[in-house]
Image (cartoon, rainbow, N blue to C red):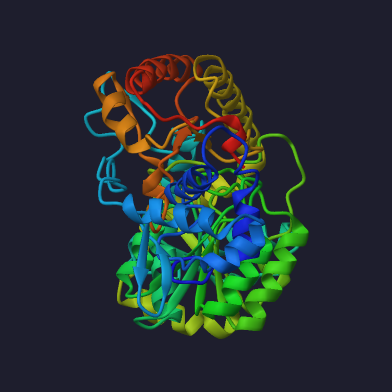
Amino acid sequence: MKGQYLPASTLSGLLGSWSDGAGPAYRLLAERLRLLIADGRIMPGSRLPSERELTDALGVSRTTVASAYRELRDSGYLLSRRGSGSVTALPSRIEPELGRHHAPGIDTDGLYDFTCAAPSAVPGISTAVAVASADLPVHLATPGYHPQGLPVLREEIAAAYEERGLPTSPDQIIVTAGALAATSIAVRAITQIGDRVLTESPTHPNSVDAIRRSGCRVVAVPLSPGGWDLPLLEATIRQTAPRAAWMVVDFQNPTGWLMSAADRQRLAIAFARARTTAIVDETLFELSLDGQEMPPPFASYDPTGVITVGSVSKSFWGGLRIGWMRVPEPLIARILDAKASMDLGAPVLDQLVVAELLRQRSTILPERRLELARRRDALASAVSTELPSWRFHLPSGGLSLWCELPEPVGSSLVGVAQRNGVLLVAGSRFSPDGGLESFIRLPFTLDPDALRDGVRHLATSYADLTTDTPTRRTAAMIA
């Protein structure tokens, strides 16, 4: 939690079995704290408990804690601020921006591109284009501007929500040029400059950039190794009173976690109590790969306080720049006013194509899911074989593996891997506040053979990088 106090009891839980290992206790404690900061589990700018408070919580000597804090200060991971105590930081040698500006799909011939978590188009796009083209002449006699979206598309989107048990009128649907545009419009509509917007860490970096460009302050809450930490989320909401929250609860990007129905209800209640408007991105909702029953839409638990963002970029094709929002009725006018200053409507032909694809989704999407499951399993098998020290949770949906490395070398690996023909984005790019140097996102959007070959090249790169790495984490030091 950036800028927030981290209680000793919470920090003790994050530390886990930190004292297992060889060496002085203060160095083991300092190393575990350093890894938590570098990995983003403790956000830069967080205020740690006093030496006395942590001493009592851990049951160690005051000297152990004081020496650990001193080591962190000497290495740049802890700052002493008057009136704020000990505040976490990232040393200047960590470069979270590495890999930030790579443009997926450009100059990637002959390279294994793991930078873009978006698959190629589903079969049936050309047929949908032909059907849409036949419908287009009716619209040519009009100006072609539809600020809220074509009625035929809004009806299809509303019907999809109805099928999921969420009553929705077509008037509640606002079509946009993709999910990122929808996020930008929603944030602009419901916030003012300086407002806080809560989000997860790690999360989708472009959306965080859009929030910050709206003049808002991002409050990032780290995910736990098992998904969302509901007590931490609730505490952060109470402490910071964010005006809005941007969340991905369906196969979270990049971790792949799926939030349970019970946790959705609990989090929705916390947002409602704080009068926080939740903007929930469901772009990956359709990509459940294990046949599981999906939880109800997040908006089911607070229909008047949740804006739902959707898109066809992951389910059908990113080349169709069509997204949308499902907006509570009291907010429709504000959203449309904000949208008018950013665009006058999405392309008519693309909207007609998407409307046809949505009509055919029950026949198109099962094939998409089967193919992605095959690619996921191929990537997971290759990583387990070629990089056995890397750890990951096998996601039940989505488009990527979130891999934890034994060493915080993610940014360095990006450069080494590129020289070996593999394009990566550093895990730190997915952290709103830096850190996550021990993580790499690996999308499973290439074909299985390319995934296996790419991982072999990646394993070579990792071996080249870590051959001379002096400090490695032991399994006992991983929470």
Left or right position of 295 against 456: right
Left or right position of 4 against 457: right
The answer, for residue 142, to whether it is visible in the render is no
The answer, for residue 290, to whether it is visible in the render is yes
Say above or below: 332 vs 478. Answer: below
Which residue is depicted at the point 43% across and 17% down?
450
Which residue is depicted at the point 30% across and 68% down?
213
Q: Position of residue 158 (x, y in %)?
A: 62, 64
Which residue is depicted at the point 49% across and 57% down?
42
Q: Position of residue 280 (x, y in %)?
A: 56, 63
Q: Position of residue 377 (x, y in %)?
A: 61, 23
Asked whether 31 or 457 is in front, the reply is 31
Point out the image quarter for the C terminus.
top right
Q: Position of residue 113 (x, y in %)?
A: 35, 28
Extreme-left residue of the structure: 107
Asked whether 35 or 293 is in front, the reply is 35
Which residue is depicted at the point 49% across and 62% down?
324
Left or right position of 264 against 391: right
Name the image quarter holding residue 178.
Answer: bottom left
Asked whether 430 or 260 is in front, the reply is 430
Asked whether 472 or 289 is in front, the reply is 472
Say above or below: 198 vs 134. Answer: below
Name the image quarter holding residue 375.
Answer: top right
Numbered circles on residues, count: 0
